[in-house]
Amino acid sequence: MKAKRLIAGIAAMMMLCSTAAANITAFAEQETAPDPLAARLALYNMLMNCSVSDFSYTVDDPANAPEKPAAVKFDLRDVNGKNYVTPVKDQGFFGTCWAFAATAAAETSLLYENGLDIDALKETGTEPPDLSERHLAWFAATPLPENSLYPAQAGEGMLHYGAEYLESIGGDRALINEDKFQGGWEALATTLYSTLQGPIYEVFAPYLTEEQLIGDVVFIDVIKDPAELEEFSLSGIVDKSSAVRYSFNTAEELVSCLGKEDSLGELSGSDIASWYKGNGRYYFIDYDDNAMWGLDWSVDESLRFTGFELENSNILPEIVLTDPQTGGYVFSERSLNAIKNELISGRAVSCGFLADTALAGQGTTSGGYMNYIDENGKRTDSKYDAKYWCHYTYDKTYDPNDPDSVNHSLASNHAVCIVGYDDTVPKEYFNDPYGLIPGDGAFIVKNSWGSKNEYTYWGNGGDGYFYISYYDQSIKNFESFDFNATNAAEVSEKPATAILPNIYDCMPANLVMRSESEETAVANEFEAPQYVRLKGIGVMNATCNETVTCSVYKLNDNSKSPVDGELKTEITETFPLAGYHRVTLDKPVYLPEGTKYSIVVKTVSEDGSDAFCVKAGFSKKYAEAQAAQQRQAYIQENGTDEGFYPSEIIYNNAVINEGESFILSGGCWFDWAAVTNEVFTNEQLGFDMFTADNFTIHAFTENEVANVQNKIVDPAEPYYAGDEVQCSVSVLPQTDFANALYNCDFDVYINGKFVANTGTIEAGKATEVPYTYTVTEEDAERGYFETTVSLMNKSSLFPDRPVELFDEYSTITVRAEVSKKTDDSSEPEDSSEPEDSSEPEDSSDSGSSSKPDTGRTSDNPNTGAKAGFLAVAALVAGIIVVIRAKKK
């Protein structure tokens, strides 16, 4: 839905403001609070001016227009001889193209960032990265359960009303899955990846059609030239009695069935020129759709929050615009340059467009939107003879001879992945009946309908790729991804910490709500579950060139607002593109267990006004209204509602709890939970058909996998060379999350030398590792010894990986005083007195040794107080105190 304005009357707003006073509390940002009613009026005025759109936007300021790249061609399959694009896949007949497009873009991003050449990997026998489309599609359609990592958000998600209805009546699983996997939107990937819901490797959640293909290969005699028919009909050209079926249940069996008989080729439907070679024996593949839909497509819930960390999702400006005066199609050169620059940066771009057919296997008709071009640059009717497949979507209803006719932009029905561009592709390669294409050039596009193998043939020479003209009137919703990914070798060497993202907005969404105001900001409040350090913040912005300031507050006890506390740090960044972005703090903020803190986000738009945005979607009330309309239409057609079930109705469920998100308006802070409870149930304001989530403000904190306390068991300073000091390390695993991730099994090292293995430790329970340190002559020379503990993870997931310890919370290094022995005495020398001291000798000891320096405070927190007390006592008494005798 494009920029739909939510309009309501002033009377409705005034009534809501007066009735909401008891429910929506205004917390003043400053000591002198503004008028609460005026603040509420400002809030509702801002909300009423919200726009709801599908993340689409344009670059309006010429000063911020992307530069045109110098390269005339660019192909991520050949960047200085390296190929960063994974092999073409086949989505089958499922509506999962959006997941395949996003996954293809993610795979290329990971390859490019790590410098991994697909062709080089193949030569060494290494499998290229293969991410799971099934994981993405399943969790887009499955709300959070109560036992997830975020139980407070249980029930949040994108739901399919028809699937819910069928499940409630015990309906067929095939129908349920068909409704769940009916399609999706490109932006779903951003809203899932940004909340760490994927991506993961294919091996953990394989796409079932790669293992299970169910149906029959049918061999049949064609007895009549299809060209003789006025309208193509399979029954009109074949001898049905000649049909022989061979059943298959896997891809391997399908290939075997194709070899059962000799044939002239595949009977490919109405695209006659591509297959008809005269009368004779042909075959076609009859997939059992119901059996395929009936497979168990679910993914284990334990795999939901896993995978690579998304650093940036760039949602690019639209290349297809609409003239506000005429409603006609307008091309954007600025957006074209933005897409080209993104490709050159090593990021493939997913997008949508209007294809001749929305699903694989439905046939592609030459002379429609797709044009076949042979090796001589001439149009051909046969896809098998075509070197280039060239696509251009145009408005078939437009009449260039009618001055009142409007050349519209068109909606998309299929998602693909752009991997390059070529400015030299002739415009004549595209089917342009009205002569509207103004110039050469096309995107190089990776599809998900297979390539050339034993049972499919698609794309340029059968490679699975094709061209889309820059001037296609349907191409839109451009999106790319940038992950925090390193090579496997680097990962194994990086110290291990437990990453605990604090998020409230787990709802997948294809819409965004945005508004501008003279003064606004949004905030999320969190509580540190244990000792953590805040290293990064994730935010979302809905248009280009927005400046975002993130402020972190350590909140006071019983704080009244998200700014009621100590400002710990602040960082400002400008994002050229919309989407999701991670910012790294200049210095981490350390937060003790139980600390409440907030992240306040202030966004300034390109024109200087404040703005906020939030993920949005259609409400359940909207879904119910759509289902009622479908039921009524079904009854009118069939005379009864028997057998009726709703289909293709999607709605969102947001779970917003008090104290999670806040919004600033009119100088006052409002709890977003109270605002949404009032606003999004109000029919007069027109919001009741929508829902909005918590604000996308993510706190990326790290906690120690384990807390350690290194100590001397019975401290008695000073020590001397040869002393054996009994020490101990307490190892306390911090969380069940860390326990699950690392198994809490560690090797303990002191000063780089192995001491002991802890075995598996239960989270929250400490284990003691004793060790003995022998004081050396070198320690005596420098006046102290110190021991430093380190841990090495021994879990099967990250074996032999160092565990990062936080010295703000752990006692990693312990230091104790060491004194020298005199050359002519077996007793310790008192370094605290001058050599000519007239102090009397201690009668309890013979010899001429001087007393030790008991006035020096140990760096060991367990010994400093005791040593300091003895030193003071010795000085006051004016006697020599011998702390301990020499070791024998």
Image (spheres, rainbow, N blue to C red):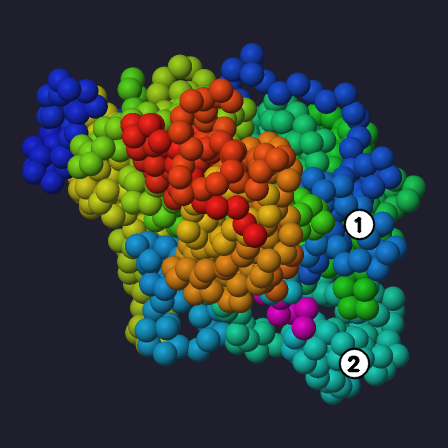
How far apart in space, not on screen, are marks 2 and 1 (Cα)?
Answer: 32 Å
The image shows residue 406 at horizontal and vertical percentages of 53, 30
Give 229 or 309, whichever is nearer the viewer: 309
Residue 497 visible, this angle:
yes
The image shows residue 311 at horizontal and vertical percentages of 55, 38
Left or right: residue 601 compared with residue 250 = left
The image shows residue 292 at horizontal and vertical percentages of 58, 74
Categorize mark 1 by other alpha carbons within 10 Å: few (<14), some (14-19), many (20+): many
Categorize mark 2 by other alpha carbons within 10 Å: few (<14), some (14-19), many (20+): some
Picture quarter with the N terminus: top left
Residue 235 visible, this angle:
no
Q: Residue furthest right?
A: 376
Residue 338 vertical placement versus 458 (above, below): above
Where residue 746 sits, quadrant-wise, is bottom right
Residue at position x 59%, y 53% from top?
749
Residue at position x 64%, y 52% from top?
753
The residue identified by callout 2 is 257
Residue at position x 49%, y 20% from top?
836
Amino acid tagged 2? Cys
Label 2 secondary element: helix
Range of residues picked out in magenta: 205-211
The image shows residue 136 at horizontal and vertical percentages of 53, 56
The residue identified by callout 1 is 118
Where residue 54 sits, quadrant-wise, is top left
Amino acid tagged 1? Ile
Residue 455 vertical placement versus 158 (above, below): below
Residue at position x 39%, y 33% from top?
880
Give 746 or 543, whichever is nearer the viewer: 746
First-in-chain label (2 vs 1): 1
Label 1 secondary element: helix
